Image (spheres, rainbow, N blue to C red):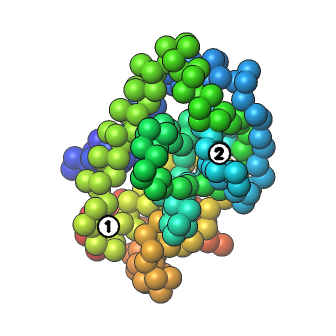
Amino acid sequence: MLNKYGAQETIHHFEFAQKTKPLTSIKNVYSKLEAIGKPFELNTGMRLYFRDENQLSYIIFLVEGCFSVYHQSSELNIGIGFSPTILNLVGIYNQYHEGQKPPRHFMVAETHCKGFKVPLETFIEQCNTHYLWPDISQILVQRLMVMSMIEEQLVCSDAYSAVRSILLEIWLYPEDIRNNFNITSVIQRRTNLSRSRVMDILSALKQGGYIKIRTGKLIELNFLPKAF
């Protein structure tokens, strides 16, 4: 992919994730589990924990909506995702390593979300019954590729590079979804940078004509230099 100056631009991890999402595998797993799943709906801002108050772990099938995922212990934002998708597959590993304290996560609805959830043990039984493990493998391998790209683009990057990556990601969202996000808040949640540091970077980019922000929403993005 070329930028406006004709130089080669590495595809953003979010764009790669959307273009390579294994939809056939996701839909096949959906079709075998939907009839036994417990439906749920979330309004914007509502949380759904992957493990309930009785410590029962669930596999989450998101059919509709946009969401964020957080570490439960620190409430650090891991990332933003879109339906259709399957969440908490890491629970499969935890099922067979009971001596280890499993990481816990929850999702927050960024838009109205719909889906269903299946208890982890039931999910594993159904995967065995319907031979769904090849589909699960496809889903997990794609996520590993995306995580590798995220690591390359974000790990050991400076503050500006982290902000740049998030701005590019948000700009790739559909406009109606993008307009739900306060860009400063998203960057803070994803990076743990101070509000003043984020505001300094955004202010400099606005002054340079690289971005336009109105009422906290990103409304225009031009070429962003790799260093600033």
Residue 78 picture location, percent across and down: 48, 58
Can the viewer see residue 97 in this picture?
yes
Q: What element carries label 2?
A: loop
Residue placed furthest toward the left: 7
Residue 101 picture location, percent across and down: 46, 56
At label 1, the amino acid type is Ser
Foreground residue among 74 and 178: 74
Can the viewer see residue 83 in this picture?
no
Residue placed at 28% from the left, 72% from the top? 158
Residue 56 picture location, percent across and down: 65, 45
Dot 1 crowding, Cα within 10 Å, few <14, some 14–19, many 20+: some
Q: Mark 1 points at which residue?
A: 161
Counting every numbered tag in the picture gives: 2
Which quadrant holds the C terminus?
Answer: bottom left
Q: Residue 56 carries which label?
A: 2
Residue placed at 61% from the left, 67% from the top? 182
Residue placed at 76% from the left, 34% from the top? 38
Foreground residue among 137 and 222: 137
Residue 71 picture location, percent across and down: 52, 61
**Relative side of 56 to 26, left or right:** right
Dot 2 crowding, Cα within 10 Å, few <14, some 14–19, many 20+: few
Foreground residue among 157 and 203: 157
Residue placed at 77% from the left, 40% from the top? 40
Q: What element carries label 1?
A: helix
